[in-house]
Image (cartoon, rainbow, N blue to C red):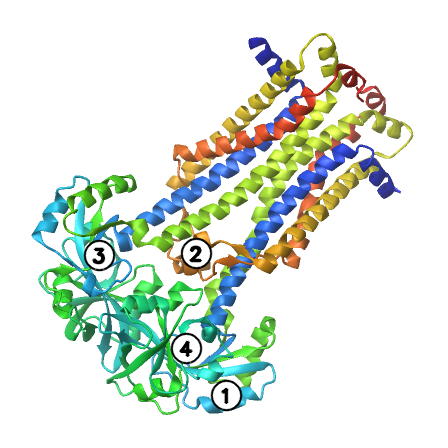
Amino acid sequence: MLLTLAWRNLWRNKRRSAIIIASVAVGVIALTLSDALSLGMMHQMLNNRIGAHVGHIQIHAPGFRANPSLTALLTDPDAIQTELASIPAIRQSSKRIVQFGLLSSSRSSAGVNIVGIEPERERRVSHIARSVVEGHYPDSSKGDILISRHLARKLEVELGDKVVAMASARDGTVGSEVFRVCGLFATLDAEFDKFHVYASLPTVGSMLGLTKEASQIVAIVDEVDSVGAYREAIQSQLGGVLDVASYRDLLPMLVFQLDSYEQLIWIFYLIVGLAMFFGIVNTMLMAVFERMHEFGVLMSLGMARSRMFALILLEAILLGLIGTLTGELLSWLVSIPWERYGLDLSVFSEALGSLGVGNKIYPFIAASTYLNSLIMVPAFAVLGALYPALKAIRLRPVEALRYV
Amino acid sequence: MSLFLHLAWRNLWRNARRSSITLAAIAFAVLMVALQDGLQEGTYTANIKAAIRLSSGYLQIQHPAYHNKPALRHSIAYSDELRRKVDSVDAVVAYAPRIYADGLLSFGDQSMGALIVGVDVQREPLVSDYHKKIRDGRFPAEDKPFEIVVGQTLLQNLGAKIGDSLVVLAQGFDGYLGNLFFTIVGTTKTGSEDLDRMSVFMPLAGAQELLGMWGRCSVLAIELPRLNDIPETKRALTAALSENQLAVLAWDEVLASLKQLIEFDQISSEIQMLLLVLVVAFGILNTILMSISERYQEFGIMLSIGMSNSRLVAIIALEVVMLAILGIFIGDLLALGLNSYFSVNPIELGGEMMELYEEYGFLPMLKSSVEPSIFIKASVECLVFTLLAALFPLWKVYKLEPLKGIRYT
C-alpha cells in the first residue's frame, strides 16, 4: 500500500521528480564511467605484463627469484614439462634461460636480460612473437637475436647487424656469442623493452655452458581466476621442492594496486555521494514543505507518523533507484563503443608506455561497479530525505493544515 | 543597484535553510577541488625535486644526439671553456660532470650487468643527493679513482662485501672493451629498487680511465635555486653555448616519461573533479529551479505591478552570485586550513602502499601546497559551474508572463 502511494506521489509532480532523477543519474554516470576507465587501465597494465613475459605460472629452482643467476637452475626442465603436460588445466608451457649480460654493437653497449626461448612453444605462452614490428621472430637456428626497437636505437643497429652478447657462464668465465639482429619488437611496456632480448634456447645455453638446464618454465592456464588453486596443484604434483609462483606472486605490486583500488574506490563514491546528498536534501526539503498541507490532512485522517516517515523515505529510495538505474543504463550505452574500440589516449603515449598500458584504454564496467552504485546511491538519497522527513512528522496536524 | 543588492540579500535569508544547504554544497565542491589540487601540486613538486636531485639535475648540458642515442660517442668535452661559459650564467648554483655507461661486474664466478655512473666526488654533492643515499661504508674518496659504491641489492646478488675487489668490464669510447679492478667502499639504498639493483657509482677519473674518456663526460648536470628559474636559465645557457653545438635540456625533457606520468595523473583527476563539480551544479540547478517555481506567484505580482522581466532576472542572478561567492569563500577558507596543515605535515605512506609508490619512482608521501593558483582555479571552476546551473532557471523567469505567474500553483 505504502509503495503504491509513494510511487503515485512521485509522478504527481513530474518535473520535481525528473530533476532529482537527473541529478542522481549524472552522479551515477560520473561514478561508473570513471571507475570503468580506471579498472580498464589497471587490468590492461596487468594483462599486458602477463602477456608480454610473465605468463600465469612460473616455475623456478628455489632461490632464483631472489637472485636471478645461474646458481639456481632447473636441472631437469624436460621432466617438469612432461609432468605439466599431464595436468589438463595447463594449456601450454615453455622453458627459458634468463641471464643478465652485456649486449654490444660496434657503436655502443647495453645491459640486458638475455632470454633463451623455445621459439615454437614461446609463441603460445607470450605475445612476444606478435610484438615483432620489423624483421622476423628468431627460429631455432643459431645466431638469431630479437631485440626491441628501443634498444636498436640505443645500440645504433639495424636488421642484419652483428651484436656481441657477453654474460657470466656457469663455470665463472665470461661467455660470449655473436648474434645477428633478426627482428625488432615493441611491447606496450617501454621499461620492459629496454632490458629484454630473445635468442633460441640452445644458443644461449651453449654460450653459458649449460646442457639441458633452464632458468624457468612459464605456463599458461585455462581459467585465470583460479590461478591460485592451479599453483597449489602444480606445487604438490612436482613434489614441493620447486618454487611455483603465480602472476599474483610475480607482479605483487600491480596486483596490490588493483586490489587496493577496489577497496579504496568507496572513497570516491562517498565524495560524489555527498555532492549528490546536498542536492537531494534541498529538493526533498522543498518537496516536503510544499506538501505540508497534504501531510496535515493525512495526519488528521489518522495516518501514523511512523508510516508517514516511511512514506517519505520510500519516495526517496524510489527516486534514488530510478536515478541510479537510469544512470547505469546511460553509462552502459556509452561504454559499448568504448569497450569495443577503446579510448585513444595517444597524446599520453609515453606516459602510458612507461605504465605498460598501451595507447588505447578499453574501459569496462564490472558487475561490482553496477552493484556498488545501486547500493550506495539510494542510500545517500535516503540520508538526504531523513531530515526533511523528520521535519514533516514533527509538525502537529493543526499546524500543518494551516502551513502556507 | 544598491536596492537590487538589498533585495537579493534579503531574498536569500527569507529561506535561510535552503540557502545554507546550497551554500554548503558550493563550499563542499570548492573544498574538494582545492584539496585535491593542493595535494597534487604539493606531491608533484616534492617528487620533481627529488627526481631532480636523484637523477636529472634541473638542467643538463648534452651532446645534441645524446638524448636519443645515449652512447659514449655522443659525450662532450669537459673543458675549461665549457666551465667558464657555464659559470658566466648567474642563476647556476653548481654543476657536476657525469658519465653514464653500461657494463658488466664480475666478482668470483658471478657476473652482473650494471649501470655505471661516474661522478665528480667533490662537485656531485652540490647537484645530487647520491652521497646521502649511502647505506653502508662511504662515498669514494677524491684521490682514489678506483673505489666504487655498489647498489645494495646488486652487491647481495654478486655475493660480495665492502672491501672486496671486483672487475668492471665495459665497452669504451673507442669501441674496445676495457676492464679494471675496483675496490668496493660502500653500498647505496636510494629508495628506487631499480637503481639499487642496477647501479654503481665511481669517481669520474676512474670512469674516464675505464672507458677511455679522458677529459670527457656524458652530461653536465646543473643545479638551480628554484624550479621557476629553469626557463630563463635554459635560455641564458643556450645563448652562452651557441657556438659549441651543445644541447641544454630541462629535467622534464630528460625525464620525459615522469613528466607525462604527472600530466596524465593530473588530467585523470581533473576529470574526476569536473564530474564532482558537475554533480554539485546539478544539485544547485535543482535548488534554484524549485525555489523559483515556489516564488512564481510573487514574481507574477511583481511583474504585474510594473517590474520588468530583465530586472527580476537581475535580482535572482544577484542572489545566485552572492550565494556562490559566499560558498566559495567558505570552501577556500576550509581548504586553506587543510592544505596548509598537509603542506607542513605530509601524509607518510607505509607498508605496501609505500612499495607501490616506490615501484613507480615516487616518494611514498602525500604533501599539499598553498599556491594561490590552486584556490583561484577551484573558485573559478565552481563559480562558472554555479552560474551555468543558474542559466536555465533564469531563462524561465525571463520568459515568465505576469498572469501565468500569479496563477501558478
B170 left or right of A204? Answer: left
Task: Tell which subunit mark 3 falls on.
Answer: B
The residue labelled by disc 2 is: A349
Q: Amino acid at mark 2?
A: Ser
Query: Disc 4 to disc 1, how far (Cα)?
Result: 27 Å
Marking on residue B131: 3
Q: Amino acid at mark 4?
A: His
Q: Are marks 4 and 3 on the same chain?
A: no
Query: Disc 2 to disc 1, how far (Cα)?
Result: 39 Å
How dense is the environment of label 4, judged by Cα within 10 Å: few (below 14), some, or many (20 and up)?
A: some
Q: Which circle's residue, 4 or 1, is located before the other in the chain?
A: 1
The residue labelled by disc 4 is: A136
The residue labelled by disc 1 is: A81
Q: Amino acid at mark 3?
A: His
Q: Are marks 2 and 1 on the same chain?
A: yes
Tell me the quarter of the picture where residue B8 sits: top right
Q: Are marks 4 and 1 on the same chain?
A: yes
Observer-side mark, 2 or 1, equals 2
Whether residue A365 is situated above or below residue A27 in the rendered picture: below
